[in-house]
Amino acid sequence: YGKNTIKFLRLHKEGKKHFVKEVEVCAHLRLTSPQEYLEGNNSLVIPTDTIKNIVLVLAKKNGIPSLEQFAIDICSHFMTTFCQVAYVKTYVQEVPWQRLHEDGVPHIHSFICVPDGIRFCEAEQCRNGPLVVFAGIKDLKLMKTTQSGFEGFCKNEHTTLPERHDRILCGELFCKWSYGECKDFDFNCIWYKIRECILEAFAGPPDCGEYSPSYQKTINSIQMLVLSRVSQVQVIEAVLNNTFYNVVDMKNLGLNNDKEVLVPVEAPYGSCACTLGRKKFFEA
Amino acid sequence: YGKNTIKFLRLHKEGKKHFVKEVEVCAHLRLTSPQEYLEGNNSLVIPTDTIKNIVLVLAKKNGIPSLEQFAIDICSHFMTTFCQVAYVKTYVQEVPWQRLHEDGVPHIHSFICVPDGIRFCEAEQCRNGPLVVFAGIKDLKLMKTTQSGFEGFCKNEHTTLPERHDRILCGELFCKWSYGECKDFDFNCIWYKIRECILEAFAGPPDCGEYSPSYQKTINSIQMLVLSRVSQVQVIEAVLNNTFYNVVDMKNLGLNNDKEVLVPVEAPYGSCACTLGRKKFFEA
Amino acid sequence: YGKNTIKFLRLHKEGKKHFVKEVEVCAHLRLTSPQEYLEGNNSLVIPTDTIKNIVLVLAKKNGIPSLEQFAIDICSHFMTTFCQVAYVKTYVQEVPWQRLHEDGVPHIHSFICVPDGIRFCEAEQCRNGPLVVFAGIKDLKLMKTTQSGFEGFCKNEHTTLPERHDRILCGELFCKWSYGECKDFDFNCIWYKIRECILEAFAGPPDCGEYSPSYQKTINSIQMLVLSRVSQVQVIEAVLNNTFYNVVDMKNLGLNNDKEVLVPVEAPYGSCACTLGRKKFFEA
Amino acid sequence: YGKNTIKFLRLHKEGKKHFVKEVEVCAHLRLTSPQEYLEGNNSLVIPTDTIKNIVLVLAKKNGIPSLEQFAIDICSHFMTTFCQVAYVKTYVQEVPWQRLHEDGVPHIHSFICVPDGIRFCEAEQCRNGPLVVFAGIKDLKLMKTTQSGFEGFCKNEHTTLPERHDRILCGELFCKWSYGECKDFDFNCIWYKIRECILEAFAGPPDCGEYSPSYQKTINSIQMLVLSRVSQVQVIEAVLNNTFYNVVDMKNLGLNNDKEVLVPVEAPYGSCACTLGRKKFFEA
């Protein structure tokens, strides 16, 4: 197979107001025959350069109403146009430009990059198969400074970790979910709703939070809330890359450090992940 | 000289509400004698490990009311405690944690990382010299989709760039400014005011913007606005690392692309910089 | 599941001569029950900290005779020791320290880091399943300045790429292969032999090279040579992330550039991949 | 001022043998008037695009006999051609392509990237001032597994570091030196000679090494050896970014770890630097 990455910016205007979408598109094709590999026969090969042109032409013609619709458009184009394509997958990721505001007034053509979680999506299709759409968020860094512990874990002669009932929970979250049949979805609206669910489930109620007995349980809470609130989501995968913080021991410096000064532990670096669906759960 | 980097998190509570500051501190010392280099005599050397301990102890005792105050505290400590220190510089940079909100309600202990411009500061002092404080913002990515051009530049036989009066202006901004004598400054308040000035000068009025004839002039506008609005700033340096966007030529694809689809040009990559002070200007 | 990354250095001495191995180990466990996720019951969970301790203890006791043997040791330990582990995968990657030489004489304890392709391996096992071992090389950057072209590809109205019979072929190679039943393998020796095959198949004979009609065919040549020369390899996957170079058009600068000055094209960025086994081929 | 970065590849042939030089050039100009900043008057501005064209044209016409000669050529061109240029600095850095060998036979057109220390240089000139040439190496990672300690350092109540007489010395080295009047220098030959000196001074004799009482002393030894062996070097600056390794305490795991298993300490991260000249030393 082959894939390639194209970065570009799509600009459009409504009156004097500008709208900007900067994306990175990665198209991934598999052909029906491997003759290019085995025989060096290039007659079925669609060059990277042509793929780039197609993506740019589709952006020009259709715009990017949502990342998901744009990914769907690209998949459809390749399936319809090239009979030698056996499988196509399109990944689209957004540069998080947000409109600038001055004293609450939105600016008509100025933007600031605010990378507090990157939106992405995927559309994939096998010839004669259904079009499947995924969406997700990545690089979302979250922290809870209390209401987190880790106790009652498996112990043996290699255990040195103490039990803790009040630690920092911090990590970088990746979530990816699949939609079922995508009829008339408002992809933008759904995405923001899911982002809200993720933040709410991570943090708990604003006045008191909710105790997390492990990174794993927090992941599960996020998945459960999304599945219960957003009916369009079929399956949701979540990965949390943890950053651990250790309370600095200041006894030999003559001080009692009551969880006031902590240092991040860069190694070992942990991660936990789970995939949860509607009817049955399964771990990946 | 020697320097080193320490990352840590300072947590404090007011009632049930948590406040978090995660910083990266880089301390830079020069000693009065180079005997460690020339003779391998370590008797004056302050080990990295000791510097780390001092920074953590100061954070524990004083907290981090502002990055600037913390940098000043560290400088003062080294100057006062170690007579072999001839010069000290402290750089402090913040991890941009922001409090999470749910339906507008602030969460008491949950935070999200929002890197839309990183705040930093520097304090430096030579023995018997004044303490000088700098503050700044970096990694601030901004874009204007119109009201920018570049015309009337120097031309010769190596010129291939066409004149343009409606291009994208996009770049990553670095600004660093110095304060005069720092008596009773509200460093946090001043920093946010300067950030507002930068955004306003970059973007112009929200309803129409302001035409920029070059990256250089935009930099100058930012500097002029900061100097005119914020009296505490003595000198301001600004660097703009440009990202150029080219309108894709779609003629041979049978389309007329009216600044709708653009691709970033990764090389050549340009940058322009200027330092502006109160009475006289000078370029660095 | 959970995984985590541990970096460490293993030093050993034979007489006065030092040997150093610095590795990054990533262990990936799946448990028989998801109760940690669903119920917040941690009783089966093996903490990251314990996993780290186990890896370090195994390194201390067994050393690292080869990356592969070390990965096998870790897998076996988890399977044998913890009955709640349903699946374990271990990834081991090497920091490419090489012994320094002075005028051809090897130094007894000094090393230089030479990252011309990073060696890695994987061992994985399901409970009651066989132990499977993979090895590989990544970040191997290669270039051929001639004997490469791309012609006869699929063309339509979106094609703008010209045919070329003398281009630069350049890219970053990733190869990963599996071994069959690993009885008494000399993993170090085999790995170096495979690296030689890869370089030879990429470059062709030293005095004339070998024409490559596409990135795809070059990948296939590499796979074919490894499979034919190294009987221990069962299946080999290869991915080539291409860097394209364009000959700079200097006509409007009054010069004829005969493939002397080229610029890398950063986007679109392409990649092609293939997996080849012994009896049948299949594309992934 | 303005600067910009240009990456390109220069290829040339001698008979059937190919020679490749891939470089990144950064040109930095300061003009005699700041009118572009203050008035938005672009008439003296030399666009990034023109600078790129000039660099590529010089590469085409002159080739790149050495990085230093190429940097000198660029400086001279700007000073000679544009009277509005007050100052020019050119930085040139090399992509470390090395010719592939098969069984000791050099390949005529295939190369491998071997980044074991990156070569760079700088040439700078003020109008009416001399042309000054610097050269250097960066990203050179070295390790000594013994013959290094750190004892007798300054101690007070914040000291927790134990004295050590047998530690790992590891770091990333940056060295930059200036040449005097550059008449008929063989820049390539000199650079390789200096690289040899650096490695030799770092490692000591191959059969026994040489004890280093501190990072600082090792830096000084490198500088002293270069100045004594290479008469063309006037001043040499060296920076060593240290990686510390801690011996893992395995007592509570029931094992005695005799400097066999060590983990890198990612923070605090230290660095030490010194600049040494011919007649007098001075620290920067």
Image (tube, coloured by chain):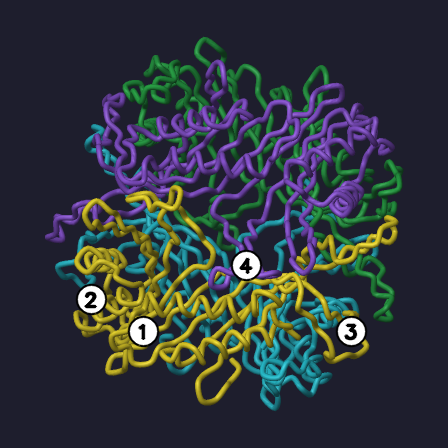
Chain colours: A purple, B yellow, C green, D cyan
Q: Secondary structure at mark 4?
A: strand
Please report whichever mark, 3 or 1, sits nearer to the chain's N-terminal start.
Answer: 1
Comparing D195 with D240, the one in front is: D240
Q: Dividing the picture into quarters, in which one does residue C35 lie?
A: top left
Which of the two discs, 2 and 4, sits closer to the camera?
A: 4
The alpha-carbon separation of the residues under discs 2 and 4 comes to 60 Å
Q: Secondary structure at mark 2?
A: loop
The residue indicated by pointer 4 is: A106
x, y (%) of residue D63? 75, 67
Q: Do callouts 3 and 1 mark residues in contact (Cβ within 8 Å)?
A: no
Question: Same subunit under labels 3 and 1?
Answer: yes
Q: Where D157 sits versus C70, above or below?
A: below
The residue indicated by pointer 3 is: B159
Which residue sits at x=52%, y=65%? B173
Which label was assigned to residue B43?
2
Residue type pointed to by label 3: Thr
In the displayed structure, does residue B186 sit left or right of residue D233? left
Q: Chain of mark 4?
A: A
x, y (%) of residue A73? 73, 35
Which of the two discs, 3 and 4, sits closer to the camera?
A: 4
The residue indicated by pointer 1 is: B124
In the displayed structure, does residue B110 sit left or right of residue D178? left
The N terminus of chain A: image quadrant: top right
Q: In this orientation, does residue C206 appear?
A: no
Q: Circle 1: is it few (<14), some (14-19), or many (20+) Cα within 10 Å?
A: many
The alpha-carbon separation of the residues under discs 1 and 4 comes to 39 Å
Which residue sits at x=72%, y=45%? A63
